Image (tube, rainbow, N blue to C red):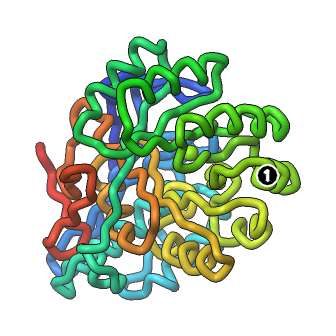
């Protein structure tokens, strides 16, 4: 297989802020694998929170080059070799995993959701994320999100109640909330009790990861479902959270690609948990890859490409809030440039 990669830098329309930081520039990488006269593409959208950056991704891809088997069908061997070579760097691994799946789908002439055994008709609605900002700007973002029936509101400031009150006063849409680790367990219980009056569908990651008893304490003292995001990177993180959360948020950039993501869906199901599929700020390459397995989950939050000023790729579409999967073989993405 011929392997190449290049930096991919994305800009968002608005500065994107969550409880721990803000940016409008997101540096990642684009991977290409060529074989059988076909090309597979994949994207790495690294998150500094998980220890990755554009520089670490470029270095990891250079090192992982030697671990790519000649036969694209040997996905298991690919992942074993990548894991042996380096423990972390999930975004870099995800890019290679995506590209190899794209190639396999193209070779077999089937879209990836078909390859994985999922029906495109079962794809969920996706939420549109409203990042933290002045209340006035957040309301403007809500207005811009008119076509999306589900909003995910980033919280974790002292204006949370004011923000939720303002948003609820203009819409009866489904509202989800993401605190990105902003609270202590006791604070979380107080905050979530306040949020309950706004009819919130669920709360994502109220407290920092690593505190399973704290998460269980929150879950036992509120009636809104709790979804773990930062607490869960790979399938190994799921069993310890059984009984402490209602569900998990899977992201390709945390777990290292589609193969591990599907495994995580099965592990979560076996433990009676709900599954959400999330993303980073990504182009349509990464978002379409995640969307291909979205028919298997309850909640999708695949809006990373919708936040971009200029998405270099086209792939998955969102129609009336629902994910519409491409019908082309493989990932089903094409370059806009
Ligand atoms: Mg989250």
Give how far across and how far down residue 83 sits, in percent. Answer: 62, 71
> Looking at the figure, which quarter contains the N terminus?
bottom left
Name which quarter of the figure residue 4 lies in: bottom left
**Residue at (24%, 74%) from the top-left corner?**
121
- What count of labels does the image hold? 1
Residue 63 visible in the picture: no
Q: Nearer the viewer, residue 297 or 10?
A: 297
Please identify the quadrant where the C terminus is shown: top left
Q: Is residue 74 left or right of residue 333?
A: right
Give how far across and how far down residue 157 sits, in percent: 64, 21
Whether residue 227 can be seen here: yes
Which of the pair 162/295 is nearer the observer? 162
The answer to whether 188 appears left or right of 6 in the picture is right
Side of 152 relative to 49 (left or right): left
Q: In front here: 168 or 305?
A: 168
* Quadrant in which ligand 1 is drawn: top right
Question: Residue 211 location, x and y as percent?
Answer: 84, 50
Q: Looking at the image, is 302 positioned above or below residue 273?
A: above
Residue under the image location 54 percent in, 43 percent down: 200
Q: Residue at x 29, y 43 (%)?
A: 148
Position of residue 57 relative to residue 299, above or below, is above
Q: Position of residue 236 (x, y in %)?
A: 71, 71
Q: Residue at x 67, y 63 (%)?
A: 87
- Per the image, label 1 sits on a secondary structure element best described as helix
Drawn side of residue 213 relative to residue 244, left or right: right
Dot 1, how many residues are within 10 Å of its Cα: few (below 14), some (14-19), or many (20+)?
many
According to the picture, the residue beneath numbered tag 1 turns out to be 215
Residue 120, quarter of the rendered image: bottom left
Q: Nearer the viewer, residue 222 or 234?
A: 222
């Amino acid at each position: 297989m011929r392997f190449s990669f290049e930096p991919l830098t994305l800009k968002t329309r608005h500065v994107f802020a969550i409880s721990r930081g803000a940016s409008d520039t997101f540096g990642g990488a684009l991977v290409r694998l060529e074989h059988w006269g076909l090309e597979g593409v994949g994207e790495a959208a690294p998150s500094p929170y998980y220890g990755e950056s554009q520089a670490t991704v470029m270095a990891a891809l250079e090192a992982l080059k030697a671990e790519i088997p000649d036969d694209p069908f040997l996905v298991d061997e690919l992942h074993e070799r990548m894991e042996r070579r380096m423990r972390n760097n999930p975004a870099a691994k995800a890019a290679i995993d995506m590209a190899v799946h794209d190639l396999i789908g193209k070779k077999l002439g089937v879209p990836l959701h078909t390859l994985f055994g999922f029906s495109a008709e079962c794809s969920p609605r996706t939420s549109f994320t409203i990042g933290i900002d002045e209340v006035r700007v957040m309301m403007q973002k809500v207005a811009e999100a008119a076509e999306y029936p589900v909003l995910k509101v980033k919280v974790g400031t002292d204006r949370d109640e004011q923000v939720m009150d303002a948003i609820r006063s203009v819409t009866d849409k489904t509202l989800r909330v993401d605190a990105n680790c902003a609270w202590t367990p006791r604070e979380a219980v107080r905050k979530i009790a306040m949020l309950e009056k706004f009819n919130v569908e669920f709360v994502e990651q109220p407290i920092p990861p690593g505190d399973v008893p704290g998460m269980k304490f929150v879950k036992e003292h509120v009636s809104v479902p709790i979804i773990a995001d930062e607490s869960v990177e790979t399938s190994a993180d799921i069993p310890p959270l059984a009984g402490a959360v209602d569900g998990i948020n899977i992201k390709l950039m945390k777990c290292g690609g589609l193969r591990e993501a599907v495994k995580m869906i099965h592990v979560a199901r076996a433990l009676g948990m709900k599954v959400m599929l999330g993303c980073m700020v990504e182009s349509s390459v990464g978002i379409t890859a995640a969307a291909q397995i979205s028919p298997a989950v309850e909640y999708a939050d695949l809006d990373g490409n919708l936040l971009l000023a200029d998405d270099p790729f086209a792939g998955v579409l969102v129609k009336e809030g629902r994910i519409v999967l491409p019908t082309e073989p493989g990932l089903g993405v094409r370059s806009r440039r």
